[in-house]
Amino acid sequence: MNDIFKNSQPLVEIKNLYAGYQYEVVLEDINLTIEQDDFIGLIGPNGGGKTTLLRVLLGLLQPKSGSITVMGETPEKGRRRIGYVPQFAEYDAEFPISVRDVVRMGRLSSQRLFKPYSTEDDRVVDERLDWVGMLEYQDRAIRELSGGQRQRVYIARALTTNPTLLVLDEPTISVDIEARTQIYELLHKINQDGVTIFLVTHDLNVISSYVKTIGCLNRKLHYHGEKQITDEMLQSTYGCPVDLIAHGLPHRVLAEHKGGN
Amino acid sequence: MNDIFKNSQPLVEIKNLYAGYQYEVVLEDINLTIEQDDFIGLIGPNGGGKTTLLRVLLGLLQPKSGSITVMGETPEKGRRRIGYVPQFAEYDAEFPISVRDVVRMGRLSSQRLFKPYSTEDDRVVDERLDWVGMLEYQDRAIRELSGGQRQRVYIARALTTNPTLLVLDEPTISVDIEARTQIYELLHKINQDGVTIFLVTHDLNVISSYVKTIGCLNRKLHYHGEKQITDEMLQSTYGCPVDLIAHGLPHRVLAEHKGGN
Amino acid sequence: QPEPSQGPSDDGRLQVTVSILPQAYFVERIGGDFVAVNVMVGPGEDPHTYEPKPDQMRALSHSQLFFTIGTEYEDAWLPRLRETNPQITFVDSAAGIQRIPLISPHDHAGQETDLEKTDPSGEKGLDPHVWLAPANGKIIASTIFKALQTLLPEHADALQSNYDALLADIVALDEKIEGLLSGNMGKAFVVFHPAWGYFANQYQLEQIPVQVGGQEPSASDLAALIATSRKKNIRVIFIQPTYSTAIAQAIAAEINAEVAIVDPLAHDWLNNLEGVAEAFAAALEK
Amino acid sequence: MAELLSYSFMRNALIAGVLVSLTCGIIGTLVVLKRMVFISGGVAHTAYGGVGLAFYLGVNPILGAVAFSLVASFLMGYVQRQTRQRQDTLIGVMWAIGMAIGIIFADMTPGYKADLMSYLFGSILAVTHTDLWMMLGVNLLVLGFVILFYKELQAVAFDESFARVRNLPVDLLYIALVAMIGLAVVMLMRVVGLIMIIALLTVPAAIGSLFLNHMKHIMWLAMVLSLVFTTGGLLLSYFFNLTSGATIILIAGISYLSALLIHKSCRRCPA
Amino acid sequence: MAELLSYSFMRNALIAGVLVSLTCGIIGTLVVLKRMVFISGGVAHTAYGGVGLAFYLGVNPILGAVAFSLVASFLMGYVQRQTRQRQDTLIGVMWAIGMAIGIIFADMTPGYKADLMSYLFGSILAVTHTDLWMMLGVNLLVLGFVILFYKELQAVAFDESFARVRNLPVDLLYIALVAMIGLAVVMLMRVVGLIMIIALLTVPAAIGSLFLNHMKHIMWLAMVLSLVFTTGGLLLSYFFNLTSGATIILIAGISYLSALLIHKSCRRCPA
Ligand SMILES: Nc1ncnc2c1ncn2[C@@H]1O[C@H](COP(=O)(O)OP(=O)(O)OP(=O)(O)O)[C@@H](O)[C@H]1O
Ligand SMILES: Nc1ncnc2c1ncn2[C@@H]1O[C@H](COP(=O)(O)OP(=O)(O)OP(=O)(O)O)[C@@H](O)[C@H]1O
Ligand SMILES: [Mg+2]
Ligand SMILES: [Mg+2]
Ligand SMILES: [Zn+2]
């Protein structure tokens, strides 16, 4: 889908990264390489620093030390090829704007400040709206949607940017099971079309079914690159007995669905 | 735990209820009875009206027609015995307030307007904070917590009200797997102690593992009272092929875990 | 196109607009029935939210003559009124009056006059309250008389006799005030807003203002003022009706004086000045 | 009616009404949607500091006002970017500091000063041709800015952090918007008065956002409503001899309250 | 220093500073945290309408001001409850309507009106004993209200819908709070001037919320800071011969900007 960057260089390289807020260091000595065509699932406990890592990746938060390159550039530059679905939408829920206008924002960029939207833009917007099943709602105001409907609109907006790398921070929060499955199927398809995906989630079902590589973040990056969740991984990340974690989620399922659909 | 209401009368009775917003009717002809000691899981697609139903139940939205009683009273009165965890927290994320103060709010009521908090209040707050694993964060400001940590604080606050009925609107959004399991175990325990629980969720694993009765809401209440999710239930609620919905969630699991832990 | 000086409200009288009420008195006395006067800042108008009303603007459109006098509000409004009403002849009714520098309380507090501060060379440092002295009243009357005479040549005789009558009244007023105040030469009175500089000049009194160039006094200004007032044995503090009395009350409480109202903008200029002179005389004799 | 148009002050006032309506409809919509109502008030009062400084330096007070309001816009934009402070607090502080600076400079200026406050007030009945040309200029500037950057402004107003990730010049756009508001407010308040500007910025857009779901539509409705308010207010004030500015505001205010009532009893309206 | 205290106007001013600081610290914290900075401004300007009406009816203008500001508080609270309109829009509209009513009534009143605007401006140097007693009364009222309902006010400020489900009298508390703000603002502005009130309501609490994480602590710090600003400003203005109100505000403003800088370079401070 996107071949601007089809050499063997990794998309993202993070080396010895420390980052955090004024009050505390949240990320310690992170080393992470995101290769092309990967589908990374990032898990980790609450407060583990997942959102913080994404903010650094998107150039919204300056690291305290260490280096980070996004497609060979600084995050501020490289992020133009990243599509982003935030964890908590930072938008104004009362803003009078239609679904279509929100999704079309994905077509904005600093390069085309003075140009109006093109018919090509409209085609892409239609397509993405269709993908997330919101085409029929395109003229509805965003303030009249339910939580899950809004979330789908945000995913459509991120897809509209034709990203090389798609970053999603728990994107299926309040999305129902049907839509959730559709969305993951969609991510799977996009990924096969050549978009690298970096997904933060708490949903181990998803991890086991769609994800190619797994990272576990709890201040430090505990695992990265494994293709399967093992008991030890969970144990060392979450630091608690695995049978509790895996309750309701038989290990068999993990193995069975790995990488398939 | 709470025996104010130990006769055989149902906790909530909803009859021929229509409700919605100025733009559209969202709930049509809802009939629902919540019996004591039940643990209801409410599923349904996005925009199905789950949050709307809760708002009616809590007296925050007036129904258009039909009747609703909460513990024999109007929702405005009966809600004092309901503990509530909202879908999207409506609080001000920047507000300078400690975790402990937030949880202690659960002890407020119109009856004790002029009385300060008691040591009994403090004991309850300690206990609830411990239950959700946030006791060590009690003096942290809420604005310094991660999304999932905040969610746990909200659950603790709802529990602090010693509710007869606990209503949760997708409470484990951005809560990690460990905490999620802990929270559901907690709900299970509370339920066994005599608190009725009404849970909105998209998580079928939870439904199959903990819930006693299931409701499926998509404008109309399609099923209510069944103890097990069947293919037909999902199909008629979501209106799509079941194998897609149940993807990553083998039916065997549903049966296996029903009602137990 | 020529502006409608013969508009619907035109009843044959000459339409004249003035800035403030005392000017209206002069114009009415001299013009008699031949003029209709339109006042821009009416009684008790609030200069902060001052907005001309449709009636005033309509009257302005019919006016041929506008007597200015150089008050505060004119700075902001005259340029606009001038531009929207090109048919009007603007006449400065204060023309020919020797303007004095505006006094600030420091002049008294420090005993020696601080002339740099009052900046007598600049327009801004000059006292606009020219109409508040009988001597200046004569000059204003003559300016207004000449302007009306040019526009109403057919009524020259009537105007002349009106003017003479007014002048006689002013001379009588002057004598009366002279009589009232001659025993108090060199004495000081305290006013909130420094409007009475010309009056003080003419009758050799000393004006001590509370306001500094139209601004609230600072704490040290107040302290100095209180010291001066005590020394000069001030018993009355004069304010004008459109100002808040709070500061004046505070000083009065401090020096055991009372607060009295004198109005610099009253319509009946002649009787008002006489009343003010009586109030000053009463205060100075205490 | 013909009589009314025979007066050039009325003709000017009606034209001024049209020009004010354009700016207020467009800028007002952005102001209401991005919740910047008080930025306009804050900028205007900060301008007072500039008037005071101009008096002190002996230059044209309008220059001082424009300079200060532009500086205030930049500062407000910059400080908010840098500290993520609450807007209302920042504006409150700027507001107060601006006024304080004005008063202190005026204090330090020797001699008599024409009432400083009058530089913040104007009247739609005393609009001159120069004013009209100046307003036309501001209108063209505002129109050009909004037409050129409509989609970006919408994106920034709706979701800043997404706009930032898309590498849109978010800070620049924000500051330009505040500067545009500042310029419009300072220019217009000289002409039609400060309270009228704030009312005309707020009310029409607020009514629009009650009933419409698209920023563009709200802008259109807001322009039409401002026009109705200014024209209606002018006519009423003419026939009943009331202060024009206050009459225009009263009509706007009553319309807003009626709109709230209508909206409440309307089943087909958006939330 | 002793010389300074020998003037009763200075003594009164210093006492007034203390009394203002108490109210401003407590109410200001609630105002800043609940983002109601402009409610205070809005209420004060609405009061102008009351002054105009009082002039028209020939009653005491302060009565009119208090009545209008209380009515405005109730209306503001009620309309917002009922329609969930944006606060800033509502306030902007009230603000403008209040002023417009004031102007129109004043217009219709024949004869002299003591400068209407002076009801919005005061001077800390002209505080009388009556004023001091009145301020003490307002202080006691505010203190009593906040001490009695501290936990409920915190709950309502933080999360209204939870407070509602707990059956707390949310609407009543909100309206009472706005009324308290209105009363405090109207009473104090007569004494120390409107811009000083808004600055003292905003700045100390804003500085407090930069560094502290608890509402109660912010209230304490805000009271101390107001006291420092008023006393410091008074002394400075005395020794350098500046306008007192403006000096107090300037000190507050400079402190706020310094606090922002310190906060930015501070690694141990909360977000
Ligand atoms: N703005 C902030 N200022 C200070 N600390 C913060 C801020 N945001 C987050 N933190 C802290 O940083 C840590 C990591 O937060 P982060 O949001 O990155 O976690 P997360 O892994 O995304 O958690 P979750 O799964 O709950 O979303 C937490 O301990 C949190 O308290
Ligand atoms: N404030 C509102 N005004 C108008 N319509 C609304 C409002 N809130 C929700 N709706 C509409 O009501 C319907 C039901 O919304 P509701 O939030 O109850 O769904 P839900 O079942 O909770 O969905 P989700 O799983 O996404 O949270 C949706 O179609 C939505 O568009
Ligand atoms: Mg997160
Ligand atoms: Mg919902
Ligand atoms: Zn004067």
Image (spheres, coloured by chain):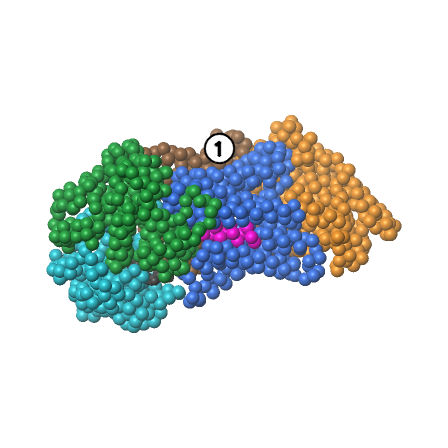
Chain colours: A green, B cyan, C orange, D blue, E brown
Residue nearest the viewer, comparing C262 with A201: A201
Q: Which quadrant of the figure contains the N terminus of chain B? A: bottom left
Q: Nearer the viewer, residue D55 or A238?
A: A238
The secondary structure that dominates the magenta segment is helix
For the point 54% across and 56% down, the residue is: D223
- Judging from the image, mark 1 belongs to the subunit labelled E
Amino acid under label 1?
Answer: Leu
Horizontal placement of E265 versus C139: left or right?
A: left
Is A97 or C251 nearer to us in this picture? Answer: A97
Residue B250 among magenta residues: no
Taking A11 as reference, is B228 left or right? left
Coordinates of residue D238 in the picture (x, y in percent): 65, 59
- Percent across and percent down for residue C46 are 62, 49
Kindly identify which residue carries mark 1. Answer: E235
Quadrant into which the C terminus of chain B falls: bottom left
Q: Which residues are magenta?
A: D21-35
**Residue sticking out furthest to the top:** C112
Question: To which quarter of the image does residue C277 belong?
Answer: top right
Determine if residue A44 is in view. Answer: no
* Residue E32 x %, y %: 40, 46
Q: Quadrant of residue C107?
A: top right
Left or right side of A171 for C109: right
User: Residue C54 occupies which quadrant of the picture?
Assistant: bottom right
Using the image as rendered, state which of residue B113 and residue B12 is in the foreground. B12
Q: Is residue D23 magenta?
A: yes
